[in-house]
Image (cartoon, grey):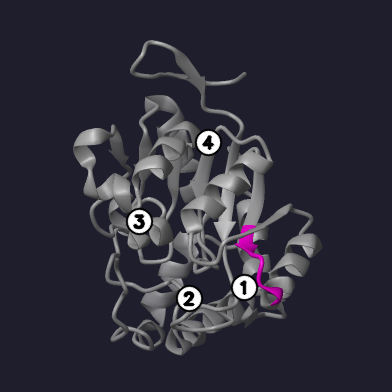
Amino acid sequence: MEREALVEDGAVQTLRPIWAVVPGRMGSSRYPGKTMADLAGHPSLWHIVERLKRATLLDGIIVATTVDPGDDAIRACATDTEVPCFSGSAEDVMDRTLRAAHSVGAATIVTVTGDCPLVDPAVVDKVVAAYEQQAPDYASNRLFGYKYPIGLDVEAYTVATLENVEQIASEPRDREHVTLYYYEHPDEFDLLGIEPEDHQRRPELRLTLDTAADLELIRAIYDHFWPTTFGLDDVLAFLDERPELAAINRDVNQVVP
């Protein structure tokens, strides 16, 4: 049954269908090609999509890449994982995300970026469940700072709200980072932060893929677990047993807008 949320004019908007939109491109300025980096014999993007398929509260998954011919590998990977792929602007990620959502008829966007090959389906479901229950404009498990390990980021927000933001957010940094406008104008939106369980509160831990050091760590994790199914708790227990692995990328600075 479709969930509905009240909006300011007293009308209702449906929260479903809820689609995960996974933005990714080969031309990353910090670490080009990371989206297709090999992890246990499959591209990182392949793992992201397959892990998202295990989330029970998503209605679909779409990859959002650019029209650049260099991103043909990303389009091919989406085909391999049997999910749709939208091609749009390289610089205007907000427009690309919104048009990808429109292309599949989504009412809600759940953003998981192409930097997150260790995304946990249970964390995705936790964010989506809280979003459906409270129906805010925007929900995230990293609202105003990291709480989970970096790389477990999940955002949920209505397409209708992003349509409004798209009309007023004109700065290039807003267009590139999509949801930055929500963070920087909290008085304009109903924002919901989702907190981790105490043992998952590890904001100092990098489980994102943005540098060669990150890739070394994530490859070690996949080499240990693959092809078994594993989640965040498994990764945390493994790294607690092998602290030298977590040290591989400890000195990498997280880039924030």
Mark 3, secondary structure of its residue: helix
**Which is more N-terminal, label 3 or label 1?**
1
Label 3, residues with CA under 10 Å away: few <14, some 14-19, many ≥20: many
Mark 1, secondary structure of its residue: helix
**Which is more N-terminal, label 2 or label 4?**
4
Residue 174 marker: 3
Judged left or right of residue 56, residue 197 is: left
CB under 8 Å between discs 4 and 1: no
Mark 2, secondary structure of its residue: loop
Q: Nearer the viewer, mark 3 or mark 4?
A: 3
Please name the amino acid that badge 2 sits on: Leu
Tell me residue 109's x, y (percent).
52, 42
Q: Quadrant of the N terminus?
A: top right
Q: Is residue 66 magenta?
A: yes
Please name the amino acid that badge 1 sits on: Ser
Closer to the camera in the image, 142 or 98: 98
Residue bearing mark 4:
108
Residue bearing mark 2:
209
Q: Residue at x 79, y 55 (%)?
A: 82
Label 1, residues with CA under 10 Å away: few <14, some 14-19, many ≥20: many
Q: Is residue 101 above or below residue 223?
A: above
Q: Quadrant of the C terminus?
A: bottom left
Q: CA distance from mark 2 to mark 1?
A: 9 Å
**Which is more N-terminal, label 1 or label 2?**
1
Q: Is residue 39 magenta?
A: no
In the rendered image, is residue 184 in sight? Answer: yes
